[in-house]
Image (spheres, rainbow, N blue to C red):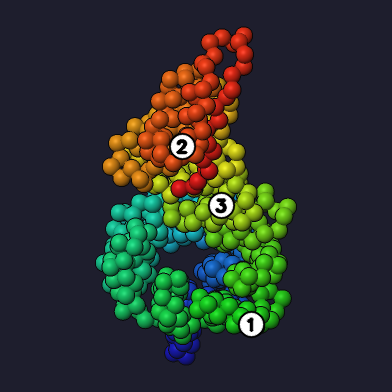
Amino acid sequence: MLKIKIASLLLSLIITGNIITAQSLDEGKKFLYYDRNTSAKDVFTKLVNANPNNIDAVYWLGQAYINMEDTASAKALYQKTLQANPNAPLLMVGVGQIELMENKTTDARNRFETAISLSKGKDANILNAIGKANVDAKAGDAMYAVEKLKLAADRDKKNPDIFVNMGDAYRKLTDGANAQISYQSALALDSKNARANFMIGRLYQTQGTRQEEYYMKYYNDAIAQDPNFAPVYVWLYDYYYRRDVNKSREYLTKYIAVADPDPKNCYYQASILYASQLFKESLAKSDECITAGGSNPYPSLYGLKAYAYDKLGDSVNAKTFFDTYFQKQNPEKLGPNDYATYAKVLLKFPGNEALAGNYADSAVNRDTLESNKVDYLTAIAASYLPTKNYTEAGNWYTKILSVKKNFGKVDLYNAAYNNYLGGACKTADSIYAIYTQKYPDEIYGYKWRARSSECIDSTRAQGLANPFYEKLITLAEADTAKEKVKPDLIAAYNYMVAYNYNIKNDKEAAINYNDKILAVDPTNEGAIKNNVALRAVPKQKTKTETTKEKVTPAKVKVKSK
């Protein structure tokens, strides 16, 4: 009887221990779901310390490390535990995930396939982990992730996490329709799955501001379903950061209330001061955060200081902190605006032009929004104008035409005119040609095609400008508001006077165009002088005769639009 009681007690303790372990694992995974990585790490660390061969606890501790950007600790943990448990499929997936993060895609795939083989392809948790690894890692194969997640869903039809990961995989493939179906499948299994609603909202947000009603609905649904779901608050803080700083601050407060203490929270607080245009206060808070960070401050703080100094007009400190920021920050976390702003700062220091150009190009290549790309290029182009470096300004304004789908008059003007001023007359002419194609009834394009052609054909021997001045004259003569176009019309007539007399030796045509000037402007001094000269000088018949007196039309000042 005593033996039975002892056996029952031992069985009870084993069962209780298993329940406690399961509860602790679930608690840690819930913390990860909330992005409370420090709390998750603490839970899993205790479990691993109690049993270093607790495979599930080791795997999830590694996931907490990865979320905290401590890949080295995750790698060391997975490799060490795998050596002691060489046939543990979940640990193989963990090592494979690290290999993906290191761009060792072939090694990673071999790990995943071995894990599937060891688990005979029947373990939904293994398949789900493989899918998640391929979604999260930049080098991961999203199609492979979808394939494995579908298998996982077939083996476990009640796990909403599988469908959320599948939605993420489709999202990585930019397949929004299937991503939404997957997230909704997760909600069908768990109506309070805040992450699924949050991710549907993000799908709609990628479609532009016209979808705001929809994505805000899903964000608010996520909050209503689970007010402790921290990711939605920090997302909305960022969303309103440049739109409504008061709302941004409100969501930041809510985020900090439910999030783990973290160095990046201090950064957010310094950042909201920056967004409020309290640049000096932001600098002071950033210094406080850097000091609190000890030997490993949050890298974005250096970038924030660089931006604040730039706003304060302190280019020296702006450059210093951008230099530091680019040295300390993970390159994958450097955004397009970081590259673009650093480029503008670098241009204030001679000798950095090539590096600035590379960073500006990186900004354009990394951004997905056309409006942002145009803003970056415009800012770089404009930075060359104060020093009258029209060649570089023209180069950067021209790049806008290849980025902007529906460029307009201002875009064409900026590109063409700066190329013209910089002496790139052929480029200017090709851009003005686009202008005349888009706006065939406007004088402006023909005027500047004529000016660009004169730049190319400086002696006028080829008559490159002729067809454009002739078209300008046709349009201007038909313009009922002739006074408005009068300067351009006179300039065109003036060119034709000189061309016909000096190049074509056609005195009658020259006189005809000169008379047209006087008809439009009887007091035009140049035309009056040319009228006398044209009628007094006999027309030269051959090249061997006395060199004639050339007619020099009155100079017309080149004006920008």
Q: Position of residue 556 (x, y in %)?
A: 51, 40
- The quadrant in which residue 50 appears is bottom right
Q: Which residue is mark 2?
A: 491
Q: Earlier in the sequence, mark 1 or mark 3?
A: 1
Front in this rendered view, residue 324 or 279: 279
| Residue nearest the observer in this picture, 15 or 450 | 450
Q: Is residue 121 visible?
A: no
Q: Quick check: 369 above or below 453?
A: below
**What type is the residue that disc 2 sits on?**
Ala
Looking at the picture, tell me which residue is in the foreground, 19 or 429.
Answer: 429
Give amino acid for label 3.
Ala
Nearest to viewer (mark 1 / mark 2)? 2
Q: Check contact, mark 1 vs mark 3: CB within 8 A.
A: no
Q: Secondary structure at mark 1?
A: helix
Q: Nearer the viewer, residue 208 or 177?
A: 208
Q: CA distance from mark 1 to mark 2?
A: 60 Å
Instruction: Give residue 249's mark.
Output: none
Q: Indicate which disc residue 381 carries.
A: 3
Residue density around tag 2, few if under 14, some if 14–19, many if 20 or more, within 10 Å = many
Q: Locate residue 157 relative to residue 544 in the image: left or right.
A: left
Residue 247 quadrant: bottom left
Which of the two labelled residues, at mark 2 and mark 3, occupies the earlier sequence position?
A: 3
